[in-house]
Amino acid sequence: MLFASIDIGSNAGRLMIGNVVSYNNTPMVNKVSLTRVPIRLGFDVFEKGIITREKQDILIRTLDAYKRLVKIYEPKELLACGTAAMREAQNANDVIDRVYNETGFNILTITGEQEARLISSSSNTLVNKVHDYSLYIDVGGGSTELTYYKGNEVLSATSFNVGAIRMLLDVVERSEWDALKNWIGETIIDGVPLNCICSGGNINKLTKMFGNQDNYTLTYTQLSDCLMHLEGYSVQDRMAKFNLREDRADVIVPAATIFKKTLKWANIQELQAPKIGLVDGIIVDLYKKQNGLDTIL
């Protein structure tokens, strides 16, 4: 059964067409098509507080292109979600109205907790859970989502205004770092082994470049070493040496910094990056809705 999801993030917009199958009574998303456009709403919102007309035009053109792809695949259902930048933009309602009037897409702005739960609900055969407890970490342009599990039970899910674009703009409040560190100290059981499952384009790229590609893992030592290595290059040099797009080359270092701090505070020595994300989670939620199961949205 085909479903479609759109993630309007702080750094990029993503459209995913996915086919959902049930495996051991668990919905699994098989990617049919994934399209990413660097809309970069966060550079407007986190600095100016609004989504400018120029960025709105880029968003409209992107969604218009997505609309054409959706018509080709004819999914059972589609849902478009806005995250940190849309949550904070002072003119978000006006932008959402304009998007609906010009494209027909109705953007649902989700909370940080909903975002965390959706991302961590994504199932993937590459996730290897050898321990009872799991910590899911997603680092985006505007926020970091953390979800703590025991088995399949969510013990806690939360979001912090710590993101790669915010770091580039130097607008991450010290209180947000403190809140993230305190949540880890108060939530995660000290000394209990954890499965660490990470998502986002940056951690996928870091794992591909510096980690273990056979099982999509990256150790804390590898992460520390690659961060120190990347910090030694300018954005332009990163683009040339590592074949990175500009919209990846500028955010990959702050994103790696966020992951490194989070792993250090949680005393995690290895992470998995199985290429799951919000678009997967939205599709899983749509599938559950179609089948009368409990949903997040």
Image (cartoon, rainbow, N blue to C red):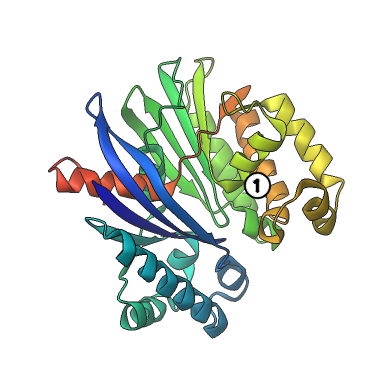
Say which residue appears at 59% left-offset and 73% top-offset: 44
Dot 1, how many residues are within 10 Å of its Cα: few (below 14), some (14-19), or many (20+)? many
Q: Position of residue 77 (x, y in %)?
A: 24, 57
Of residues 283 and 293, the one drawn nearer to the viewer in this rendering:
283
* Residue found at the very far left of the displayed protein: 292
Of residues 60 and 169, the one drawn nearer to the viewer in this rendering:
60
Say which residue appears at 12% left-offset and 43% top-offset: 292
Of residues 175 and 18, the one drawn nearer to the viewer in this rendering:
18
Residue 17 visible within the image: yes
Q: Secondary structure at mark 1?
A: helix
Residue 268 visible within the image: no
* Residue found at the very far front of the displayed protein: 72
Q: Is residue 289 left or right of residue 229?
A: left
Q: Is residue 247 above or below residue 287?
A: below
Say which residue appears at 37% left-offset and 75% top-offset: 96
Q: Is residue 196 left or right of residue 105?
A: right
Q: Is residue 252 above or below residue 150?
A: below
Of residues 19 and 270, the one drawn nearer to the viewer in this rendering:
19
Q: Position of residue 268 (x, y in %)?
A: 60, 24
Within the image, what quadrant is residue 11 found in? Answer: bottom right
| Residue assigned mark 1 | 255
Q: Is residue 265 above or below residue 82?
A: above
Q: Is residue 165 left or right of residue 160?
A: right
Say which residue appears at 55% left-offset and 71% top-offset: 45
Q: Position of residue 138 (x, y in %)?
A: 51, 43
Q: Is residue 229 left or right of residue 21?
A: right
